[in-house]
Structures are given as C-alpha cells and as structure tokens.
Image (cartoon, grey):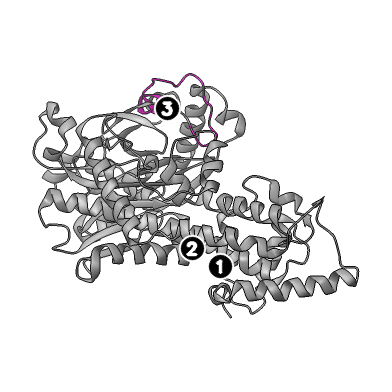
Amino acid sequence: MSAAAAIASPIPAAIAVVQQQRRGRSRGGGSGAAAVRCSAVAPTSAIAPILADLRLRCAAPLPVLRRVADAMASGMRAGLADDGAGELKMIPSHVYSLPTGNETGLFYALDLGGTNFRVLRVQLGGKDKRIIDTEFEQVSIPREIMHGIAEDLFDFIASGLSRFVATEGDKFHVPQGRKRELGFTFSFPVNQTSIDSGILIKWTKGFAVSGTAGKDVVACLNAAMERQGLDMRVSALVNDTVGTLAGARYWDDDVMVAVILGTGTNACYIQQTEAIPKLQHLKLETGNTIINTEWGAFSDGLPLTEFDREMDDESINPGEQIFEKTISGMYLGEIVRRVLVKMAEVSDLFGHSFPKKLAEPFVLRTPHLCAMQQDTSDNLGEVESILSDVIGVSQASLLARRVTVEVSDCIIRRGGRLAGAGIVGILEKMENDSRGHIFGRRTVVAMDGGLYEKYPQYRRYMKEAVAELLGPERSNRIAIEHTKDGSGIGAALLAAANSKYAAAQISTR
C-alpha cells in the first residue's frame, strides 16, 4: 500500500484500533523513550477535529485558487504602475536583449546566492553549434568572509574566479583584443539601475557583510577583479529566476515565464516595455524585457492557518514573504511540525510523552516530508524511521505514521495548488496584455528548484491547479518544463547577448 493509500484509510477506525493496542501495551508495561512526560493527555481521538480543520483550511478549492490568481494579476499591474503601489515589487531586469542562439565566443558566469558560489564558462558556437563546451566549479565561502567586510568578500570571489580562469583549456578561447565577459547571478535584493549595475538593498541568507549598503555590487566585483589582475568585466547582472528564463529561452523561443521553487521561490516573465507605466519616462523603444516579480511577498487572499500565523510571528521577518512561507521548501516542513506539536500536546498520538526534539523549530524539513510521502510499504516503515530519527518518537504507531503523512499531504497539496494559481495569475495578466498571444499558442513555463524537481506530489498538485483554473483547451497549450540549473548558463548567455562586442559578433557571422 502506498502512503497516499494509507492516508485514505478511515482515520477514526484506525484510532479505535490503536487505542485498544495501547491499552494492551499499557497493561504489559509498555516503553517510554520520549523525553518529556505529559501530565494529562487526551486519547488520540482528540486529533480528529484538528485534522478535519486542517483539511478544510488547506483544501484550496477552485474558488480560492481563482481569487488568488486574480489577486496575483492585480498585484502585478499595481507594481508595474508605480514602485511601492502593491505587494509585488515588479523589478525591471533591464534585460532588453535576450539570447537568440546567434551568440558566439567564450563567456563566464558567477552565481552567488548562498554559502557557496559557482563559476562556469561556456563556449558558444552560434546557431549551428550552440553550446560547444562548458565547465564549472563550486567554491565554499568561509563564515568569517560572509560576516566580514565587502572588500574581503569580493576579493575572495575574484580570487576563486581568477584560479578558475587559469585552468582554461584549448577548448575555450577569447578573440584577440577582447576582455572576457561575465554574467553575474546575484540572488540578493538589489535596486537594479541598468543591465550591468545594481545597488545592494540588504544581505539575506546568512550574509552580514559590512561596507556594502548603497554600493553597486557590479562595481565592487569589477574592482576586485582588477585587484586580482583579472582581465574581465561584468556585462550582465541578473537574479537566478531571470537567468533561468534566459537559459531556457535559448533553446525554446516559446519560453515566456520562469519560476523557481526550491528553498525559496520567485517568478519572472517577459513583458512588453510599453505596458510598464513606471518606465515610460525612460522613453524606451518598443520591445520586450524581463520583469522580476518577487512574488514571495504576495499575500492577498491566501488560505492561512493558525500554524502559518504562528510561524510568521516568530520569523525574522514577520508580515513579510507570506507567499514564500506558504509554498516554498524552507517552510513546508516547519508548518507540518507545528501541526504535529499541537496534536502531541492535546493527545497521546506519539505516546504518553511529548517527543522533545519535536519542539525544535525547523527540525522537520521538506525533504523529510517528501521521503515519507514516497513510502510505498504497508506499514509505512520509512515514516516510522523518520519519526524516530528526526523527532525522537519511539515506536510510532501505525496511526501516528498515517496521520503524519496526511498532515504532510495537506500542507504540500495547498502549497502546490497555490503555486499553480500564482503561475495562472501571471499567464492571465500576460494574456490580457497581448490580446490572445499566450493561450492562443504554445507557451512554456520554465521551472527550476529542488522542491519542484524532487517532490512529485507537489509537482502534481501544482499542475492540477493550473489545469483546473485554465480548463482543458487553454491548459493544453501551456507547457510546464523543468530547466535544471539554468540560471548559471542563463547568466553567461545574457552576458553574450549584452556583450559590448555584440556588433562585432554580428558583423562577422
């Protein structure tokens, strides 16, 4: 029996059986390995109303999804009209030249977005040869650098980049008289002022680097490369979502949207410049650009539970990034943990003692939920192992295993369906702008991130929501396709598309 089938079994009947088993164990002495003794707990039937309420609040039926999709589209329009007009920042990427496949030459990319940075190089051969070869390396950033000063951080990065350039083999070559060019994927909040400049707003993801506030991160990196004697310049500054879109579109002209669903989440899409009111003063030529929605900040109409609100209240950024806290991998396991805490407090679901490790925030992670939902055994043995190893439940009953899987499924189903509603909101806004050019043809949504890639139930729930909202005819024209690790290659491709030698490339084709 699969985990999904297991949770379909009647929970009330299972409760009765397990209570009888526990009474038998109690008469025989039982075991008590959990760490905290509960002075008074109700029988496991006390979890039934909690579970029923969770099912109801996390169901995300079609009317709720419709409200979320409409609110997402409305929030996008507000953010395009004026900075600060809505929850969605709708940040212009200043990408006006997308990769076409004609790009040639050697280009580098640097991807900085966490405790590691990645460097790669790609040799492009134009329409006929496309990507001839590519190589990459990953470098860990020491904690003292992450908490140090700006010059030390960028010198450390430039030094790693310089060592990587030094290993350039015969397969890679730069035309004589040209500098190497770099696409810089910088996944921290910036106020981007052009394709190759951006002012840092703040550090996130565990970084606390002093001396960078209000500085252009591209200028910082260019200066560090100069100090290293590295003959290279940044041609494009992008975030990971924009890089993913560019990388996917290089292979498929129908790619119009990119979504990251991993530890965090974001989405971007291709927008006509004339439909961006807040950029009209720039008098841009008619064409397209990529808009970074920063959709993690969205919150309008989301079906939240007491567990979401408690987690948000105790977070480092209460009241912010609510959509991200509802649909992304960083938070799904923590929401499930909080539900299980309440169940353990009011019942003997995990025995007569409260598992001490269950009280630790973020001890239960989304990969644990995924592993439990893939359990196909009759006795849910993998679920039992995770409950024992991760939260310290000694000999979890079959009921406890089933309930844990069902709670996980409730939270994952809601997350996937809300992500699907967000995607539909973007598509419908684009359809409105283009008067039929989105749903009247094949349109591709490029997806990346570990949550989407590795969690099949989440992926299925997301796609089901898209199909329900769009209906069979329109949804059949929307292709949702995985683009693995596209942001690095995408940054290199954007460096090529925005190369200062682009005119020379065109003239020699």
Disc 3/disc 2 C-alpha distance (Å): 44 Å
Of residues 151 and 431, the one nearer the viewer is 431
Q: Nearer the viewer, mark 1 or mark 3?
A: 1
Horizontal side of residue 253 vs 345, given as left or right:
left
What's the residue at 56%, 65% (across, down)? 406
Residue 367 seen in render: yes
Q: Are marks 1 and 2 in contact (CB under 8 Å)?
A: yes
Whether residue 219 appears in magenta in the rendering, the answer is yes
Disc 1/disc 2 C-alpha distance (Å): 9 Å
Q: Nearer the viewer, mark 1 or mark 2?
A: 1
Disc 1/disc 3 C-alpha distance (Å): 52 Å
Tell me: residue 90, above or below residue 56. Answer: above
Residue annotated with mark 1 = 373
Residue annotated with mark 2 = 455
Horizontal side of residue 53 vs 16, given as left or right:
left
Q: Position of residue 332 (x, y in %)?
A: 52, 52
Whether residue 337 appears in magenta in the rendering, the answer is no
Disc 1 marks which amino acid? Gln
Q: Which residues are magenta?
A: 204-221
Residue annotated with mark 3 = 229
